Image (spheres, rainbow, N blue to C red):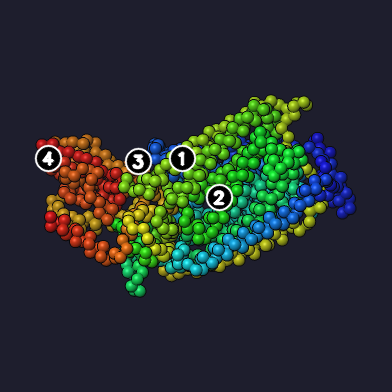
Amino acid sequence: MSSTIERPAGTPLPEPSRRERLQRLPQRELKVRGADGTLVLTHMFTAITALLVGGIAGLLQSLEHSGRVHLPEFLGYYKLLTAHGILMAIVFTTVFILGFFYAGMAAVTDGELYQGPRTLAWAGYWTMIVGAVLVVIPLLAGQASVLYTFYAPMQANPWFYVGLTLFVVGSWIGGAAIFAQYAQWRKAYGATSSPLFSFMAVATMLVWQVATLGVAVEVLFQLIPWSFGWTDTIDVLLSRTLFWFFGHPLVYFWLMPAYTAWYLVMPKLIGGRVFSDNLARLSFMLLIVFSIPVGLHHQFMEPGVESGWKLLQAGLTFAVVIPSLVTAFSLWATMELAGRAKGYGGMFGWLRGLPWKDARFLGLMMGMLVFIPGGAGGLILASFNLNQAVHNTIFITGHFHLTVATASALTFISTMFWLIPHIRGRRITPRANKWMLAQVWTWVLGMVVMSTSMHVVGLMGAPRRTKWVDYGSSETLASSWVPYQVGMAIGGTILFVSVVLAFSIMVYLATKAPVGTATEPAQEFPLADAPRTGLEVPAWLERWRLWLTVLGVLIVAAYAAPIAQIFSDDTDNGAKAVQSFKGDEGKEEMPWVAEEKADDSASSNADSAAAAEPTPTNTKPDAATAGTMVDVELGEDGGKLFLRPSVEKVAAGTTTFAIKNTGAMPHEFVALKTDTAPDALEVTDSGTAKEDGRVAGTEPISPGSDVTYVTLDLEPGKYVLLCNVTGHYGLGQYAAFEVTG
Amino acid sequence: MTTTPGTNKPAELPARFEKLDTLEKWWMRIGIAMLVVFVTLVVADTLRHDTKHAHGATTINPAKVTQTAPFDKPGVYKNEDGTSYTAVVIAYTFGFMPQGDLVVPYDTPVHFKVTSLDVVHGFQIPGTSNVNLEVLPGHVSEMVARFTDPGRHLILCHEYCGSGHHFMATHIRVLEKGETPEEYAAKQEDHESMKDAA
């Protein structure tokens, strides 16, 4: 140990001696070493791998969403979207955050993690990995395309939920490691307060532990029993409310570690100091208090919750303005003081005193700057009435790509840029710094292009989480979205370049960067929070029980009544008895669609007096009666529907259409004998084509069902084959067909 | 380090930064004022136009939607008050009932009542209105809106509901000023019979 700190062993020292000991704590070099280094590096490389794979999913998805690129069938859009969300928002962030906190806790407390916390940290890591693997398997198999919000009653493979549970349990064990390290240190030194970094780590993990209680109840008591078939039905509104109890504080779980880096790492990098230790602590305490009782602002547009409770939670959401502004003030004050200390004056001249060419700083700075529009967008979304204009549009996606995907993610990446070489005892060469700068700038550029496109087209009504579609070629609103969707793909591509740069740079810094020497030292652990006594911090700021009690009171005030209302809502009319629907790609069963159309086609048959229409059958006719065989494939491809006959022309006589639905939704087959061009059929107000000249047809055919055969005698002439399920003709599901004489 | 022992403040603060405390107090006052203004605006607007916002206190048995009034007859109906309309809509994977356009009069309150037969869906009328609802099975989502942009507009599902989600859409037809849905329907029928005669 290079440190001169001695941990007091055995019986606690009497009060005065403890105080003296704390006050005598020498300034020592902060370091993460040995066993802690391995632990932290493992977390960093797991996180960056999740970022890379999640980035590939993001790239493919943004290309597909432009409508210009069509991906092969096995790469389902919603599968990619689920993978992107889970890998980026859950795996990358959580694993990085834990690793970062372990590193900082080791550095600022006693120079290393104690044995117990370190064992816990590893146990947590492996639990998370097992969980992640369990999530990924059904996901790849297409049995969990439920997106990372997994809203019931759409149902994933049960192991998907078990995997998520293990992942969260793993993160709880990780949180326990941080609490244990903190508690042991505080006990050993008899301190009422602790180094700012450890304070922030504990505060963040407390938000996480309390927030995940909501999703844990949802998954353990609702989703798992229901997906294994132990219970038949599920209360949808309750599951959503529990999800968002977790879903919004999750945002603060992403943000507070970024704040930690902004408050503590940034001052060191610019040669400044933490503006005010107490103010930083106060803002974190306020974040804890206001992070959780706000989830209903994600449910503004849904029934079953009274407006009054939505408004209350909107107000509580706004309250984060206070800690956010405290933070903004402190950070700019730190930067201005540092800039002026270097002799740069003027209203904004001091900005020149900041190390813009230091990538470690630039990443943090860009994260902070991007957080300004990101936070403003958040206030818009928290406004009950404004939310209505953009709820579930891609405006939301644009918003959180500024907040979590830039303010947090870019800060995390820049943190890894110094943490990895620090642990490996290597240094960042000027050349490596240039690549790091390129990484930061490509990220910012890609995000500005992508997020701006998303915000604008979201205001124009484009929905989020929706595969590219033109809603039929005559739809002018949807076609006005296309240029922006192309913009998103361009931004997404630039971002992917940035992800690859980040990954490559980190591999280089871990393995190839020069090892530090006496003249050119290895990368330091840049933390402005040197080990210090903490004695001057008012004790009430670090009384966790007090603040957790305040939080508990607010949660009860904000949630007790709405949840009680969900439980008391008309249990007698069976509203709770919602059945499950599989979230598998391409396996939806929609019996009511068939029923609906059955009535419909019966009446239209009567109208058109097609008396002698052949009866469709699933039995293959024998060669003698079948005549000419024509295979017809029905399905969807990249936002378009299709109907593809194997030939476009047959000779007059007996013909059998062998119809197969290879798509993901029901389609039907209708043959019209008409001279009208296939794209010029008249469309009724009910969204179907007029079936003038109908000679044959089927009812809607469910995806994956057996081949349907329709045998009839065709007269010479021009025909149109189409699917006349509502809207499908308009989406291009037709083909020309000719019978020669 | 040149910190004064026991504090985190720089030992020698340049004179001009002694103003920082004052600046910070003003900064916080601005923040709190912002909070008060935003919350007041949101609350006032909501109280004034409560039905214009997504709401819905009614529950429904999701297995019996099509047998439960008013969802046994999806469509647009004139209300008893003789001036406003109700649009009854069922969302299902991957479509909406009634089949075909919802026909609504110009600048008249239309009370939407939407529920789901299966998973969670969305009901959004972008470009021409702020109609934006989450549609949950077991619940009736409601909202009142007026339309002043005659023509045919897109209605789409904006909540991921499965592999065909992006095909889930229908239309709303906003009539010209003075025209009623009843007249429009009669005219459509005339049109039909004339064509059939021809």
Which residue is under mark 2?
A165
The chain ID associated with circle 3 is: A
The chain ID associated with circle 1 is: A
Label 3 – label 2 distance at C-alpha: 35 Å
Tags 1 and 4 on a common chain:
yes
How far across and how far down the image is residue A451, in percent?
51, 44
Label 1 – label 4 distance at C-alpha: 49 Å
Which residue is under mark 4?
A716
How far across and how far down the image is residue A440, in percent?
60, 36
Q: Residue at x 47, y 54 (%)?
A: A390
Q: Residue at x 16, y 56 (%)?
A: B195
Q: Quick check: A219 above or below A481?
A: below
Q: Is residue A339 visible to the viewer in this orientation of the structure?
A: no
Do the residues bearing badges 3 and 2 touch, measured as CB atoms within 8 Å? no
The chain ID associated with circle 4 is: A
Q: Label 4 sits on what residue type?
A: Pro
Which residue is under mark 3?
A637
Q: Quadrant of the C terminus of chain A?
A: top left
For the residues carrying marks 3 and 1, which lies nearer the camera in this image?
1
Label 3 – label 1 distance at C-alpha: 22 Å
For the residues carrying marks 1 and 4, which lies nearer the camera in this image?
1
Earlier-in-chain disc, 4 versus 2? 2
Q: Label 2 sits on what residue type?
A: Thr
- Mark 4: give few (<14), some (14-19) or many (20+) Cα within 10 Å: some
Q: Quadrant of the N terminus of chain A?
A: top right
Residue A167 or residue A542, whichever sits in front: A542
Which residue is under mark 1?
A487
Do the residues bearing badges 3 and 1 touch, measured as CB atoms within 8 Å? no
Earlier-in-chain disc, 3 versus 1? 1
